[in-house]
Amino acid sequence: MKKTIKKITCFLLALVMMLSIATTAFAKTNVTPVILVHGLGANPVYKNIGTDDQKEIKTFGLETLAEDLIANNEVINEVLKMLDPARKTNVDELIAGLKKVVGDDNVINCTADGNIKSGQGVINYWPDPLSKHKDYWQEADVAEAAIARQLCKSVGAKNVYCFNYDWRQDVCTTATQLNSYIKTIKKQTGAKKVSLVGCSLGGAVLSAYFDAYKTKKDVRRAVFVNPAIGGVAVSRAFALDLKIDKKTVLKYVKEMETAFNGGDSQMLFRAITALGDKRIGYAADYLSKLVKDKKAVARIYNEVVKNWIGNIPALWECIPYNSYDKAVKEMSSIGFLDKNSGLYKKIKKYHGVQGRFAKNMKYLKKNGVQVAIFASYGTMGIPVTSQANNQTDALIDTKFASAGATVAKYGKKLKAKGKYVSKDKVINAKTCVLRDNTWFLNGVQHMRFYYDSDATKLVANIATGKVKANIKAVKKKYKKGQFLKEVNRKLVNC
């Protein structure tokens, strides 16, 4: 009898253990997987992939640009002349020097049809969660990796993914790759939907994805962080909107002392100022005349810029929607853009995506997708176009990143009133495509989202469903309104 009872007991214990293991193995998590889509330059791309000569391609060559310029006597001589009105700069020598810096076969550029060159691309494609890639985010303090770290803290690294892609290629191609990636993650996790966080150029990728695949209803939440959805005013340079004004340049340098990176780069801008306001002014005066010389400008574009970055679709796709037609006209007229090329077909396709953004976002909201947009302001634009006095996040113009806000010029105020107008009279959110789902962050510059800061926590909390993606819900739960200012990494209402 005792042996029988013992056998029955052992059998029951074994059965319980088996059922317990089976329950664990087949249980589906209630957590929606979160996929982070980074911005331009945030992911390394390589040449000679799979060979002994595999090397990372430097971002636009900027890492060595200063060294290359210093080592180039032609460029240095001509730049020094710009700082002295008594010495006349030689345009021929300046262009010759710049051509040497860029090189005859610049590896960062794409082919004439806007395709990635053979043997180049991304090697760290991660179809597994960030719990397998802790080196990427575990010590991250700022930018996309810091947002990834915050997401991991919120829902666990096993539920967070990073979609890496070659950010040079056209955005619609990237959107197709993102669609395949989402399929992979859904299959692996058994999840019916995912949440997406698009940072900077990644916001444009999300826009292109929804334009092509919104009816699939694969997404529960979509968060746009400092997104390039509407373009960047500095890209109006493609439309030959070139304006360099001495007063504006000096104002920009002075403002950047305290504005850029919260003042962390103050000494850099003070060093620039140490050259002397007069000498900077001399250079600005010279460049102001140079950009009005149509022949010289055409030469710089065709002999320097085109070989360097002229065929990168992603840069063309940052042209503001209303500047596109003029950009195509101007660049075609000087021989910089071939309208019969594959490059033109790519940028034309994304231009259509830009035009349908409002319609696509309204479709998403109507079909239950929670959408949030974070746009920053408080910094003037880069002083090389007529739009230098736009409010920006130090790169992307606030009116574009917010999908339609009415924004005062830098240093000016609006006369509008109402609940959608910021107390500092800089922003009127009433004209936004998603006015109840768009936040404005004063002082959080382009992708300067620090780990464990209020701004990064808010992005993560919305992306992971800790709070609904609307102004009313966030205000009720966190006492944070639509207009926020960052002070010592804390957000206060403004």
Image: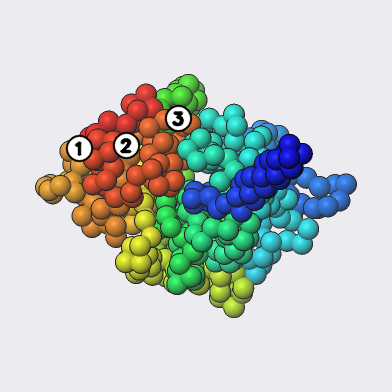
Mark before the other along the chain sequence, 3 or 1: 1
The residue under the point 29% across, 42% down is 474
Disc 2 residue type (three-letter): Asn
Q: Which mark is residue 442?
A: 2
Q: Residues within 10 Å of mark 1 (few under 14, many from 20)?
A: few
Name above or below for residue 3 compared with residue 293.
above
Mark before the other along the chain sequence, 1 or 2: 1
Label 1 element class: loop
The residue under the point 24% across, 40% down is 475
Q: Nearer the viewer, mark 3 or mark 1?
A: 3
The residue under the point 18% across, 46% down is 421
Classify the position of the N terminus by image quarter. top right
Q: Residues within 10 Å of mark 2 (few under 14, many from 20)?
A: many
In the rendered image, which residue does mark 1 sit on? 424
Q: Residues within 10 Å of mark 3 (few under 14, many from 20)?
A: some
Residue 177 in the image: state x and y as whole percent. Answer: 61, 63
Q: Position of 249 compared to 311: left or right?
A: left
- Give me the C-alpha separation between circle 1 and circle 2: 10 Å
Label 3 element class: loop
Q: Nearer the viewer, mark 2 or mark 3?
A: 3
Residue 382 in the image: state x and y as whole percent. Answer: 42, 43
Residue 4 in the image: state x and y as whole percent. Answer: 74, 42
Q: Is residue 212 visible?
A: yes
Q: Which mark is residue 452?
A: 3
Q: Residue furthest right?
A: 52
Classify the position of the C terminus by image quarter. top left
